[in-house]
Image (cartoon, helix red, strand yellow):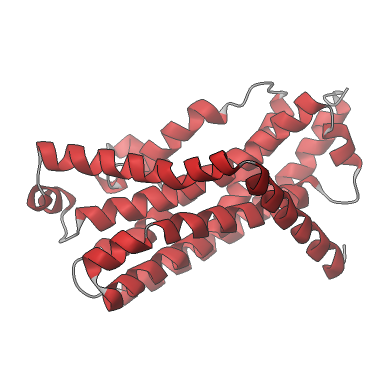
Amino acid sequence: MTKKNYKALFRAGLYLNYTFYKNLRLEFLTFIISPYLFWGMILALGYIFGSSQAFSKKVGAQVDPVMFYTASVVIASSSMNIMYQITGSVIFMRWSGTLSYHILSPYRMSTLFIILHIPRYLLRSTISILSFVPPIIFMEGLYDGITKIAILFLAMIVGMLPLLGFSVILASILLIIREQTNVFNWLSPLILIFSGAYYPAYLLPKWAQFISKILPTTYTLELARTCSIIGSPNINQIVFMIALLLGITCLYNGASFLFVGKAEKIATKHGVFE
């Protein structure tokens, strides 16, 4: 497939999401408000039953709990969204009767899953981060606020790379097992827990830490949370997390291209698309 084909597919994804938000303004408003509700609830419970000093002591570092959960909410919501969209698209295609047509299209399923959903991820993640710009600037000041926002954008972009491959692998599993319900509805809370969205993953039990280490969202959250450290960001830690995410990207995306091809063959052989 030529570069021109990829650009056409990417533009189609952009137009799809533009028309989606244009025609569903209430959905767009809900998307803006819902992270604030979750963010406010977590912080309210934290300050009612604890304090910032107790939180820093528990975490083992001098962190700002407000920025800590701002980073958590932004990255967790955007990560779960793209995983939900990619895995859920398999179910939707089957329900609508269009899955067989997608299989027969000139594009591979992995290409459709990834290219069509990159615009949605970038758009929703950018809007999510920008919606938190006012409170971040208010709390941190202009210079520090811009620095922390830049870290969030960096985590969003780098964290997207392994997440795409991971999501395609999950979608491929749905093809193989002929799943008719969107299992991600109950799987997403577990992924959030094991990724350390609510609490750092290294504070989880040993068996849970093992699971967290194979989830790309764990490292994306850790990268984003470097902006919550009081004082200047740790550049060495940021570089290390980026290198780690790039390594995981090669692993998951390489596996996804192989896995989705086998999933298509297995699913077609057993007549899943009938």
Residue at coordinates 10% horizontally, 41% vertically from top-left? 50
Relative horizontal placement of residue 3, taking residue 257 as reference (left or right): right
Whether residue 218 is visible, yes or no, is no
Specify the quadrant of the image occupied by residue 198: top left
Whether residue 136 is visible, yes or no, is yes
Give percent across and percent down for residue 12.
Answer: 78, 55
Give percent across and percent down for residue 41.
Answer: 27, 38
The relative height of residue 51 versus residue 234 in the rendered view (above or below) is above
Relative horizontal placement of residue 230, taking residue 159 as reference (left or right): left
Residue at coordinates 19% horizontally, 59% vertically from top-left? 63
In depth, the one of 44 and 202 nearer the eye is 44
Relative horizontal placement of residue 68, taking residue 178 as reference (left or right): left
For the N terminus, the image quarter is bottom right
Give percent across and percent down for residue 97.
Answer: 84, 27
Give percent across and percent down for residue 113.
Answer: 71, 47
The relative height of residue 215 versus residue 177 in the rendered view (above or below) is below
Specify the quadrant of the image occupied by residue 162: bottom right
